[in-house]
Amino acid sequence: MSAIDLNSDLGESFGAWTLGDDSAMLKLVTSANVACGFHAGDPATLLSTCTAAADLTVRIGAQVGYRDLAGFGRRFIDITPRDLTADVIYQIGALDGLARVSGSSVTYVKPHGALYNAIVHHREQARAVVAAIRAYDQTLPVLGLPGSIFFEEAESAGLRTVAEAFADRAYTPEGTLVPRTTDGAVLNDPMVVAERVRRLVVDHALDAVDGTPLSVTAESVCVHGDTPKSVALTTAIRSLLDTECVTVRPFV
């Protein structure tokens, strides 16, 4: 029987600004990538998200990113490796404190946005993120894109790497994500997305934006909490996976 983890970026609201429906998403996913306050989320939001996740036994991951609230962490920052390592340690530690107060803990790390995309190819930044995770807790798995420099550095450092795929994002023929600035980069048709995930889990395949077939093996599938219709997308995914007798469970 096939099995898959479903993860989502949550805890991204800030002050009076509400982003996504975290309460609904937490009832559908098995892992929550909770923002850490640098690119999204404020302390009260993060605490309530961790508490809700703990109550539903959803795993909590540190969604670490650049210090970029104005750009939602989607702008590349040419930060020094020393500063990036310190920033990532700071974010993991802050979220872990909130998670522990909630009766849970941080169980994995997933870079966000521009940092996620940068460390696919940027070795210095990838190495800096890995150094931070090793310094904080070398037993923490890392969630990321298979074939990335980040995974290469993480594996060399002895970290567990967990390959993920994206339900709601288009892929290039090279297997990377189509930039959000490109038309069609974000998918929001529930039936199309659900079938895409079913095929990915059962057949380990999906099509790139130009129709090129890609071979993809993933332990986790991400549905972004800020994607339009994210709750409808995830509901459709869960329904189709249930029909296909695919078990949805945390990877850790």
Image (cartoon, rainbow, N blue to C red):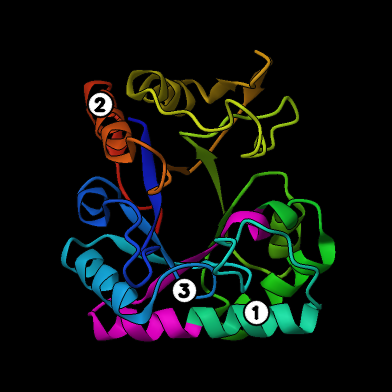
Instruction: Compute the Cα span from label 1 to label 2.
Output: 38 Å
At 36% across and 64% down in the image, what residue appears?
13
Mark 1 vs mark 3, foreground winner is: 3
Query: Horizontal and vertical percent for residue 73?
Result: 59, 62
| Dot placed on the residue nearer the N-terminal end, 1 or 2 | 1
Name which quarter of the figure residue 138 lies in: bottom right
138 displayed left or right of 25: right
At 23% across and 80% down in the image, what residue appears?
102
> Residue 94 in magenta?
yes
Mark 3 highlights which residue? 36
Query: Horizontal and vertical percent for residue 219?
Result: 48, 44
| Dot placed on the residue nearer the N-terminal end, 3 or 2 | 3
Q: Residues within 10 Å of mark 1 (few under 14, many from 20)?
A: many
Amino acid at the residue labelled 3: Cys
At 32% across and 51% down in the image, what residue appears?
20
Amino acid at the residue labelled 1: Ala
**Which segment did they paint magenta?**
93-116
Mark 1 highlights which residue? 132
208 displayed left or right of 58: right
Instruction: Compute the Cα span from label 1 to label 3.
Output: 15 Å
Mark 2 highlights which residue? 245
Name which quarter of the figure residue 46 lies in: bottom left
Where 128 sits versus 238, above or below? below
